């Protein structure tokens, strides 16, 4: 079982469950620091995603009497969680009658340049396109890059009344 909360909720759970201090694991994920703690009595993982540095959060937690270690508790074997995905799509002029569309996902917020580099890497590897650089591709294909953040993806899920089941 997993509880995902904000900084205040995470701190409240630490106070309630471990008044004498807990072991909290911290890991960087793009612009965020992930905090996790495991309650072995009921095998609940408490987690928060905070837009502060690992060093700052570690110092704050240690000041509250908690031990900090590098790492992350998870119920999944290294898989990126839905709320951590960014979807990138590129529409571009192609040699066919219809425009091309390329879609990928990233575990962090990529720049438009990174997205173009990724599409070119794929096109060069499979022989779709001869080796070219980002600028030449931009001039020839006139790409339109769209990047959806996790919040925007959640809005689409909510708007379309989709439910995503995350199994333990």
Image: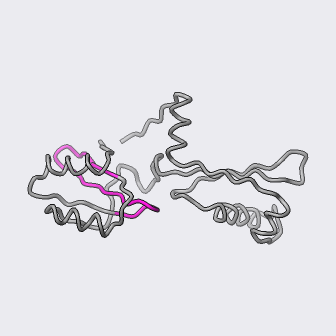
With 160 as the anchor, is 18 left or right in this view?
left
Where's residue 105, x and y in %? 59, 53
Q: Position of residue 73 (x, y in %)?
A: 31, 56
Residue toward you, 149 or 132: 149
Determine the residue positioned at 13% across, 58% down: 21
- Magenta residues: mostly which secondary structure? strand
Of 28 and 135, the residue lying toward us: 135
Taking the magenta stretch, the answer to whether it contains residue 125 is no
Whether 62 is drawn above or below 97: the answer is below
Residue ID at (56%, 56%): 106
**Count of all numbered marks drawn on residues in the image:** 0
Q: Residue 158 location in percent, x, y?
A: 50, 32
- Is residue 137 depicted above or below 89 in this figure? below
Residue 46 within the segment the image draws in magenta: yes
Rendering quarter of residue 130: bottom right
Residue at the spot x=39%, y=58% of the render?
51
| For residue 45, side relative to residue 128 (left or right) | left
Give the quadrant of the C terminus. Answer: top left
Task: Judge from the rendering whether residue 105 lies leftward or rightward of residue 142; answer left or right.
Answer: left
Q: Position of residue 123 (x, y in %)?
A: 76, 62
Residue at left offset 36%, top offset 53%: 49
Q: Nearer the viewer, residue 76 or 13?
A: 13
Identify the image quadrant of the N terminus: top left
Q: How is the image coloured?
A: one colour
Q: Residue furthest left?
A: 20
Q: Which residues are magenta?
A: 27-48
């Amino acid at each position: 079982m997993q509880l995902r909360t904000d900084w205040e909720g995470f701190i409240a759970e630490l106070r309630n469950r471990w008044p004498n201090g807990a072991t909290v694991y911290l890991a960087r994920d793009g612009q965020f620091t992930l905090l996790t703690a495991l309650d072995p009595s009921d095998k609940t993982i408490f987690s928060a995603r905070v837009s502060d540095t690992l060093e700052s959060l570690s110092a704050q937690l240690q000041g509250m009497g908690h031990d900090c270690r590098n790492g992350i508790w998870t119920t999944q074997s290294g898989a990126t969680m839905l709320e951590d995905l960014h979807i990138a799509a590129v529409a571009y002029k192609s040699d066919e009658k219809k425009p091309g569309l390329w879609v990928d996902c990233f575990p962090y917020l990529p720049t438009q340049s990174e997205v173009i580099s990724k599409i070119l890497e794929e096109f060069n590897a499979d022989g779709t396109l001869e080796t070219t650089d980002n600028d030449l591709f931009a001039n020839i294909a006139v790409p339109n890059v769209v990047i959806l953040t996790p919040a925007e993806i959640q809005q689409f899920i909510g708007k379309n009344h989709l439910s995503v089941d995350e199994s333990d």
